[in-house]
Amino acid sequence: MFSFVLFIVHALAGTEPSAIQQESGLMSANVGDTMVLQCFYQGDMAMHLSWYKQPFREKPNLISTIYKYEECATFYHEFKDNPRFSVQSSNGVNHLSISDMKSLDSATYYCGSAHSNVVEFGKGTILDVKGIVLRNTVLQQPVSESIQPGDSVTMNCTIHTETCAGGHSVYWFRHGSGESHPGIIYTHGDRSDQCEKTSEAGSPTQSCVYNLPKRNLSLSDAGTYYCAVASCGEILFGDETKLDIHGKYNISNWSYVLQNDISYTAFEEQWESNSALKVDELVNSLLRKWHLNILVPTGELSLVYTH
């Protein structure tokens, strides 16, 4: 707990750049694969480096620690004497290797450092290990969708999985442009009323459908959406749904007021763009052209001439 408090305080202070650079985002692998999670560090100070595993909606577990000038890492808990886990450490490098991957390896992995009474962590890598057992699958639709602001879309997640005593939970993630990693936007909890149970070769299975409706979409809703189900001790992710929102902006009947209070219509123009930033760029160029300052930035823009 003390380490995490130090980390939070240092993050809020923001006085120095982070010494840890970790791959972030979602990485996928299959059962039996080998995956190397990369972590780089910088600085001349002596430091201890560590790896943590955080299963979905659980607390982080310490995997390993190593002193900067040592060659071999120390492993803890279930990772101790486990040949599937190893650390590749050298100058500026602290990579975690996981071999013969299993579904239970699905989690978020954090690389950390401790030096000068400061604890820092990387942004975290979400690792999704897909099982090869076909009765546990997640089908996500649509694959991609291109729409206009104000439109609506419904994404669905169809899950075929074994029935477990603990039930299952479904989560939706969104990874927006410029964001370091996906964030949870919605959870369905355990909703067995949306499932149909079947029995195949004596193994009870169920098929469940979950919908995520999005209404009156705006540019901020664009991004890549993921569906995930936690069931039977593992987490399964759908492929992805890419949501592209193409904005259309009408810039019309803009008026400005001269210092002698005479109103003029500046221009009337329709302009299409995929980015609100481009709208800002257009507005700024017009202001420079007419030497204008915006007084009321809502509705029909009121401008005052400042030449």
Image (cartoon, helix red, strand yellow):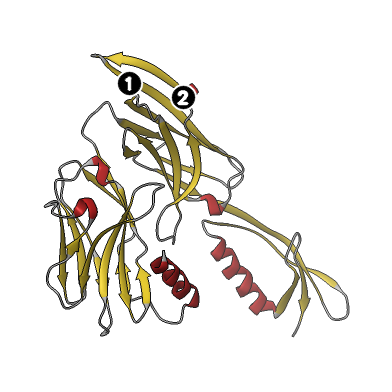
Kind of residue at badge 2? Ser
Residue 257 position in % (x across, y down) = 82, 74
Return the residue nearer the eye: 83 or 250: 83
Tag 1 residue: 205
- Which quarter of the figure is the N terminus placed in? bottom left
Dot 2 or dot 1: first in sequence order is 2
Residue 85 position in % (x across, y down) = 16, 55
Q: Is residue 245 above or below residue 49?
A: above
Q: Secondary structure at mark 1?
A: strand
Alpha carbon of mark 2 to alpha carbon of mark 1: how far? 12 Å
238 sits left or right of 266 in the view: left
Label ID, residue 192: 2
| Marks 2 and 1 close (CB-CB < 8 Å) | no
Return the residue nearer the eye: 97 or 280: 97
Residue for point 16% across, 46% down = 33
Residue for point 64% across, 73% down = 286
Label ID, residue 75: none
Which image quadrant is residue 202 in?
top left
Q: Is residue 150 above or below residue 170?
A: below
